[in-house]
Image: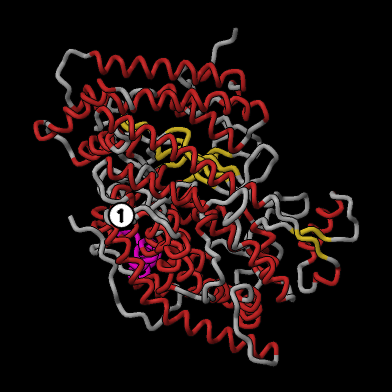
Amino acid sequence: MAENTLLQDFNTPYGTVPFNNIDNSQYEEAIDAGIDKALQGVDAICNQRSVPDFDNTIVALERNGKDLERALAVFFNLLSANSDDEMMEISLRVSPKLSDYSTSIALNERLWQRIKQVYDNQDKFNLSPEDKMLLQTTYDSFALNGANLQGDDREKYRALSAELSELTTRFGQNVLKELNTYEIWLTKDDLTGLPDDLVAQAAAEAAEKGRDGEYLFTLQQPTYMAFLKYSDRPDLREKFYRLYNSRNSKGEYSNIDNMKRIAELRRQIANLLGSETFAEHHLKRTMAETPANVYDLLDRLRDAYMPALKKEMAELTQFASDTEGRPVTIKPWDYSYYANKLKNAKYSYDEEELRPYFPLDNVIDGVFGLATKLYGITFTPNDSIQVYHPDVKAFEVRNPDGSLVGILYTDFFPRASKRPGAWMTSFREQYVDENGVNVRPLVSIVMNFTKPTPDKPSLLTPYEVETFLHEFGHALHGLLADTNYASLSGTNVYHDFVELPSQFNENYLTEKEFLDGFARHYLTGETIPQELVDKIVQSSQFGAAYACIRQLGFGYTDMAWHDAKQPIDDAVALERNATEQVKIFDPIDDMIFSPTFSHIFAGGYAAGYYGYKWAEVLDADAFAKFKENGIFDKKTADEFRNNILTRGGTENPAKLYRQFRGQDPSVDALLIRDGIKEAPAIKAEINKD
């Protein structure tokens, strides 16, 4: 039997992954062996006779399991980016093993006692701020999962957690199952206003069911949103809206009882772990820290955006009335329809007209060049570094002095073996090993841009350029990391801080000075005209108050469910009360969105939905410093690099942010960016230390 490459040290340039020597037969063996070795390592930590200290327990645990991490990084990254049926089957087999492995460590009483002893005696050790953060995150990863509980409480915790896991899974499955039951059959007369591609898709769906000449629509989000945006038939828009917004509220796939129980289970778990509410428990490990700070931000944004929303809605109502030649009252199913028409009337802007100015090769030069201007780093292709698919390219990233920053893989085009979307990931995090060697990271950014053809390059829309900038921001967070511990490196930061580097980068899309460096028409070489840049800005500001207030409604509702001190009986009343101050339209019957709110009931955003707006405040405020000093100002860029990008999760992000900005983040910059001109200068207070 051939040697398993994943079980050997990688003898390659910079320790990069030798993809050419890895095949599907190696994954499961490597993961099994990695689990065994990691468990042996945990036993060795527990069996030491020496008194527990930071190095022999906390650092030893941090460095344990490297073989497993290496195998998992390769397997799961390729499962997303270059998968096949066999890999899918392997993932189903290894997932329970990995779950058992995690549980066995989390419930290892001897290991926990060693960690607790170090934690309780930490003043005896000479710990740096980064050491203290590693100790805190290690302690929390056990304590927040019930390690501190004894006897009946520990059993109760396990039972509550098991039920919670089952119900969150069922919630998500119910949303999916009910969504797939909807079939709306229309005739040709019903299609007025709809785009050709949507009509063609509906005709194809009907033909598959053997009903040629008819049109089948579903409530899948892209179809639903397009129908409300383009259909000239208000009666059908209302029908779609009512169906979509009453999903999972009754019948076989109702989530009403599920979400009440999920919220109650989370509350009981929080109580067991010493907090009054789940939000209080969860927010301890975030930049926000407390429910009060979350409400403070939501309230400040509400006060700033509600007056602007009233103006937006008045303008839209007037436009709709003028368009129809009669007084119109905007209903929720009318908003997208008239907003789209008003936007086109004001800006006559189509993203497609900008594609010719964004050929991918130019955009790569522009985005990489941005990092060169700001941080002095260079990107050089290296064909000797192995890649997992011919479309993938590897770049050496270096500092001005020639030292290695890391390796960046780029994977830009769709294929059957790759999931949709865009993401940044790592094949290896940056860290300092036991010999003092600074191990540099292997970072990858994955997109799904249109492939070039023999006579036309890959041309991007502004949204796709923004996506590239976003993921590249995450990549810089990983590449520029300079920490001792992998678990605190790069993007391993608090949930409400992780989007700062990525969203910060997006701000450059509307800067003519940046675009002039690379955005040229692929046929004529003409630089992008100022009027088109203005349209990007104006378009991004259109409906900003509506979009913000809608998000605040979700944020308040999330907090209402998860900051509750008592069991919740009436879901409709809860949602009505939570959204009363950010109400855009009058409530319709008993219609609520919570039964389909998968972000908080089946995803990772429970007591965390506010994080979307939190990150926007941070990125706008951070970019405001660049606007003050010059968008390519080297001193400001050095401060951003040294206080944010290199530091990962080594200190409280509120402290890191203040070190960069010299102040707490202000919501002012976001208001200016969104065109909320009359906004007062108000600050979102973030925890003081």
Q: Quadrant of the C terminus?
A: bottom left
Question: Looking at the image, is 337 positioned above or below residue 467?
Answer: below
Q: Where residue 486 sits in the image (x, y, percent)?
A: 35, 34
* Amino acid type assigned to the residue bearing label 1 in the image: Lys
Q: Determine if the magenta segment contains residue 620.
A: yes
Question: Looking at the image, is 432 positioned above or below residue 618?
Answer: above
In terms of depth relative to the viewer, which is nearer, 7 or 545?
545
Q: At 27% across and 35% down in the image, what residue appears?
A: 143
Q: Which residue is mark 1?
A: 565
Dot 1: few (<14), some (14–19), or many (≥20) neighbours within 10 Å?
some
Kindly report the secondary structure that dominates the magenta region of the rendered protein.
Answer: helix
Q: Quadrant of the N terminus?
A: top right
Question: Looking at the image, is 518 positioned above or below residue 11?
Answer: below
In terms of depth relative to the viewer, which is nearer, 492 or 229?
229
- Residue 359 visible in this rendered orientation of the protein: yes
Q: At 58% across and 33% down in the image, what residue appears?
A: 78
Is 661 placed left or right of 507 in the picture? Answer: left
Is 395 placed left or right of 43 in the picture? Answer: right
- The region drawn magenta spans 618-635
Q: Where residue 656 sits in the image (x, y, percent)?
A: 26, 53
